[in-house]
Amino acid sequence: MAVLLAGSYELLMVIIGSTGAGVAEFAGEVSVGQVPSVRVIRARLHVGQPRAQRVRAYLTALSHL
């Protein structure tokens, strides 16, 4: 499980690019099955709509593990 989580984190870093430092703030939400909205992701990570949608899709998949 730890290897899967580490690999998932690395993939997320590739998806969102240099904004990876802010990803940890979503960990608590995802761990309880809550996925932040695209609007929240855009605001917290300072990314555009397409990237926020990709991040949300990824976080949604993680929440179902």
Image (spheres, grey):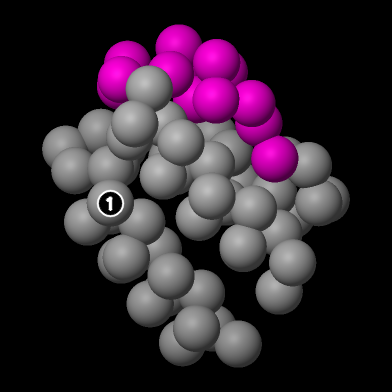
Q: Is 5 above or below relative to 53?
A: below
The local secondary structure at tag 1 comes to helix
* Residue 18 lies in quadrant: top left
Instruction: Please give the residue where the numbered disc 1 appears in the rendered image.
Output: 15
Left or right position of 48 against 3:
left
Q: Residue at x 30, y 22 (%)?
A: 47
Q: Is 59 above or below relative to 17?
A: below
Q: Residue at x 46, y 36 (%)?
A: 53
* Residue 62 lies in quadrant: bottom right
Coordinates of residue 56 in the picture (x, y in percent): 53, 41
Coordinates of residue 51 in the picture (x, y in percent): 33, 34
The answer to whether residue 38 is magenta is: yes
Q: Is 14 above or below relative to 49?
A: below
Q: Residue furthest left?
A: 18
Coordinates of residue 8 in the picture (x, y in percent): 43, 70
Image mark count: 1
User: Which quadrant is home to the C terminus?
Assistant: bottom right
Left or right position of 60 against 58:
right
Coordinates of residue 11 in the picture (x, y in percent): 32, 65
Q: Would residue 45 be visible to someone looking at this image?
A: no
* Residue 36 lies in quadrant: top right
The answer to whether residue 19 is magenta is: no
Q: Residue furthest front?
A: 50
Q: Which span of residues is magenta-colored?
A: 35-48
Q: Amino acid at mark 1?
A: Ile
Disc 1 crowd, CA 10 A, few/some/many (<14, 14-19, 20+): some
Q: Would residue 47 be visible to someone looking at this image?
A: yes
User: Which quadrant is home to the N terminus?
Assistant: bottom right
